[in-house]
Amino acid sequence: MTEPAMTEPVMPGAALSIQPAQAEQEWEVLAWLWQCFRHDLALAVGALPYADGRYQAQDLPRAPGEDHVAYLAWRAHPKTGEQAPLGFAVVEGLTGQRRGLAALWVAPVVRREGLGQQIALDVLGRHHGPWSIAFQHDNPAAGRFWRGVADLAFGSGGWGEQKRPVPQRPDVPPDHWLESR
């Protein structure tokens, strides 16, 4: 696997490196973490694993593309010192008028360290233009998180929120969409 670039010394709990997934092995790591992401969403979206034991991955790109990019967040593993993935973000709409954050996930054990916010702000800052960020109605923690990120990234009053029906799912509450102005 390609060693992620670090800007500070590597030690447990230290520097976080957020890099685009480029090598095939990095996309394999992303695919594994995607399963954790979908597992976390399972209660909010009523999902079960498929016959092969995995959650759906049709929305996960398989390689870098013109219209999307994925980022992996790395930090030294506290037991081995080797770089370990702590989270990821997937951005879509790079060739369109509006960017979208298709997914963001952080390992549960480090969620209270502010890494999710750090990853989100880093990724939002890398791609200029208007943004859309969606989250499920039944996930109030996500709502608090994303509204706080939107205030920091776009400024208070620099974004709006609306509810939109989930396509092909009239049985579930609408999703919330935050959009920068």
Image: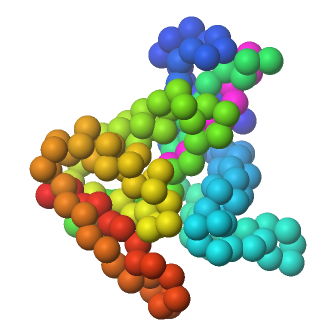
Between 111 and 72, the residue placed more toward the observer is: 111
Position in image of residue 88 (x %, y %): 56, 45
How are the residues colored? rainbow
In the image, is residue 82 part of the stretch drawn in magenta?
yes
Magenta segment, prevailing SS (helix, strand or loop): strand
Residue 174 percent across, percent down from the top left: 40, 78
Q: Residue at x 57, y 8 (%)?
A: 9
Q: Residue at x 54, y 31 (%)?
A: 112
**Residue at x 28%, y 47% (from the top left corner):** 150
Q: Is residue 34 visible?
A: no
Please give the range of residues in magenta: 81-90
Q: Is residue 173 left or right of residue 150?
A: right
- Which corner quadrant holds the C terminus? bottom left
Q: Nearer the viewer, residue 107 or 21?
A: 107
Instruction: Quadrant for the N terminus, please.
Output: top right
Q: Quadrant of residue 4?
A: top right
> To which quarter of the image does residue 132 belong?
bottom left
Residue, x 56% and y 48% (percent of image)? Answer: 105
Classify 87 as above or below 161.
above
Q: Position of residue 44 (x, y in %)?
A: 58, 67
Q: Number of marks in the image?
A: 0
